[in-house]
Amino acid sequence: MPQRSGRIPGKSRPVKSVGRAKLSDVAARAGVSAVTVSRALRKPEMVSDDVRRRIDAAVRELGYVPNYLASALASSRTHIIGVVVPSLTNGVFVEYLKALHDAFLPKGFQVLVLNSRYSQDEEERAIATLIGHHAEAMILAGIDQTDRARKLLEGSGVPVVQTMELAEKPIDINIGMSQRGAGYAATRFLLDLGHRKVAHIAARVDFRARRRMEGYQKAMADAGLDSDGMVIANLMQSSVQRGAELFTEMLAKAPNLEALFCCNDDLALGALFECQRRGIRVPEDLSIIGFNDLDYCASAYPALSSVAIPRYEMARRAAEIVLEIIRGSGSRPKQTRIDLGFEIVARDSTARRTRGSARGPRTTRALAK
Amino acid sequence: MPQRSGRIPGKSRPVKSVGRAKLSDVAARAGVSAVTVSRALRKPEMVSDDVRRRIDAAVRELGYVPNYLASALASSRTHIIGVVVPSLTNGVFVEYLKALHDAFLPKGFQVLVLNSRYSQDEEERAIATLIGHHAEAMILAGIDQTDRARKLLEGSGVPVVQTMELAEKPIDINIGMSQRGAGYAATRFLLDLGHRKVAHIAARVDFRARRRMEGYQKAMADAGLDSDGMVIANLMQSSVQRGAELFTEMLAKAPNLEALFCCNDDLALGALFECQRRGIRVPEDLSIIGFNDLDYCASAYPALSSVAIPRYEMARRAAEIVLEIIRGSGSRPKQTRIDLGFEIVARDSTARRTRGSARGPRTTRALAK
DNA sequence: TTGTAGGCGTTATCAC
DNA sequence: GTGATAACGCCTACAA
């Protein structure tokens, strides 16, 4: 609200409001008091029909829009839900945010979204900002907050929901899944298909991606396989393009690759395109599995296998719990740590390893199975 | 701020603050007045070193976070930029929003994003909400606001930027391009490659998509071609999957299709996958061009031709102009209607029509060119 | 059903 | 350089 009303310094009062109409303006025009207008707007049934009509008319005529700031300050209710995500463009968070919007807006809450850009420091700053805005609840995509951020959150007194992953020591409420377990399962899935030379590529490696990778490494180790030289983890922005690049790089390191576990679907799609470009048949020559199971996985040719994570459901549950707490004025949910699991979605880009499908000289055929 | 301080009804004052620390708490602890604390926080150079140090310590010890609401109310500065987009998941707006975030956050502004879900009514409501929050500027993706929304915006007194498309009568500032012109150009591009049976598929048809389609129709008409039966416009959500579906449907209507102009890249990608699935060679049998030129177009196989629109640049310019107005306290930019154009990006999914590439019986070979 | 009084936490203004 | 005081516009509590 850049332009101010024509306030005169000192003890005098505003001479003429050059800004927006306010409650008292509407009240004057409708011939009632300000409180009555306030009531008519919030609880119309508590006001007589006649008065309500006059007020409605005055509101329309003056183009009155309530000042949310003043309202929030006076009532201690901001109706703002603070949300922090590491990325605004990653398909996973895009859908996650949409789910939050869909859940909160109909209930009269605004969602204030801040981007931490995969940085803990930026996340801490975002959290401080949201606390300053007196968000009524905080929903975080991730469990890796700084100590100061945790203190701020604990001191804020509002419900805090950490999502996307299960935490050892949740700050408050935690709705997630095991990223490490999902990475393990995806790798195990490929191993169970008979593949032995299973590689992993990752970009924009954050905490979650790292744990997925750990799952991969553990699965490999558990199978008695060596994952050295079978991993490329890149810190740069992830993209379809990057998928093609990293896959190409991996191919140089491990030309007799049998299966590829990609840290996310964009990389998987890029790898798939690169295979098409190189005439590598998927899944005959190479099995590919992505992570997240974004929309396009099912439509690709061949349809991409992936690990479906309950991003929509995590957001929905978070919203549900938060609304319950806010409404029930503090009644905590019974369960504060919820595992929503994940699912391996097997499609056409992964297949059982068969003899004679090799696309190059294969030195060993050491399939125990 | 759900939990209130322990205020006692009647004339008594708060007994003990169970909520957050406030300015006066910090002041008391630092042994100065509240105003001084406020000053120390906003203009550190205006207080003595000693006082500043004490205040800093008190702030830290109490975990004080300024109440943004009170500050905004008192100063008439909310540092909030209101943004309305029709979709939170469409790749175009995702990047557009990211650009806005990137431009505003470093300057100390928050971006409050509301989703109109392609509905004018919802957009109107969103605009009212943002005005209620006293956003210092309004950035809208689109030019098709309701009359009431226009009135609200005009009455708000803040800069309003309509983007994504050029408007006949902008509300205030307008940064865009010609959607119709882009649709025309994309079609013209296909026609210039020698194609005659050029079809158009669209999903989630909004005003912009409609104008792109009009461009398509005009280009066809200008070339003396009939576009009847060559268009499928679907109101459902757009997606890669939908692209495959609509393409299949189109194939049934026009089996001897030569080129396909898709309303967006998701549809184009879906159509491409469907071609692969059916053994239709792209571009030999069919040229495909998408719209928006999202990230993955360049990486697809074959790389997808598309129409690049300056979404990032539109957002950047909008932010730049808004910041200038806010800073310069109202100085209007010289230019209030900016055409940022578009670009046809020709890649491998489109090619000149050649003899003998027909994949079915071709009745006519009427290529004027 | 309607009105009065006071306060929400901060900042602008003016005086010291 | 620091402090007292009055807004900012609305809402809660209570009275009528």
Image (cartoon, coloured by chain):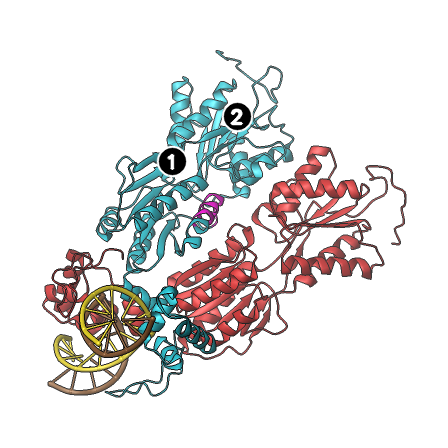
Chain colours: A red, B cyan, C yellow, D brown
Give me the chain letter of mark 2.
B
Do callouts 1 and 2 point to residues on the same chain? yes
| Residue B302 left/right relative to B10 | right
Q: Indicate which disc residue A18 carries.
A: none
- Percent coordinates x, y for residue B363 in the rendering: 54, 16
Question: What percent of the width, then of the height, locates residue B267?
Answer: 52, 38
Check disc 2 and report its element: helix, strand or loop.
strand
Q: Amino acid at mark 1?
A: Arg
Question: Over which residues does the magenta segment extend?
Answer: B89-100
The one of B42 and D3 positioned closer to us in this rendering: D3
Local packing at callout 1 (Cα closer than 10 Å; few below 14, some 14-19, many 20+) is: some
Give coordinates of residue A306: x percent, y percent: 66, 51
Q: Residue B210, which numbered label?
A: 1
Relative height, residue A8 to residue A232 (above, below) = below
Q: Given the image, what chain letter belongs to the residue carrying mark 1?
A: B
Image coordinates for residue B4, horizontal then vertical, percent = 36, 79
Instruction: Tell me if label 1 and label 2 are in contact, CB under 8 Å.
Output: no
In the rendered structure, does residue B99 fall within the stretch colored magenta? Answer: yes
Residue A302 seen from this side: no
- Which secondary structure lies at badge 1? helix
**Closest to the observer: A312 or B102?**
B102
Q: Quadrant of the N terminus of chain B?
A: bottom left
**Quarter holding residue B22:** bottom left
Which residue is labeled 2 in the image? Answer: B259
Callout 2, which amino acid?
Ala
**Mark 1 vs mark 2, CA separation in Å:** 19 Å
Q: Residues within 10 Å of mark 2 (few under 14, many from 20)?
A: many
Q: Is residue A109 above or below residue A190?
A: below
From the viewer's side, name the closer residue of B148 and D3. D3
Question: Quick one: label 1 or label 2, which is nearer the N terminus?
Answer: 1
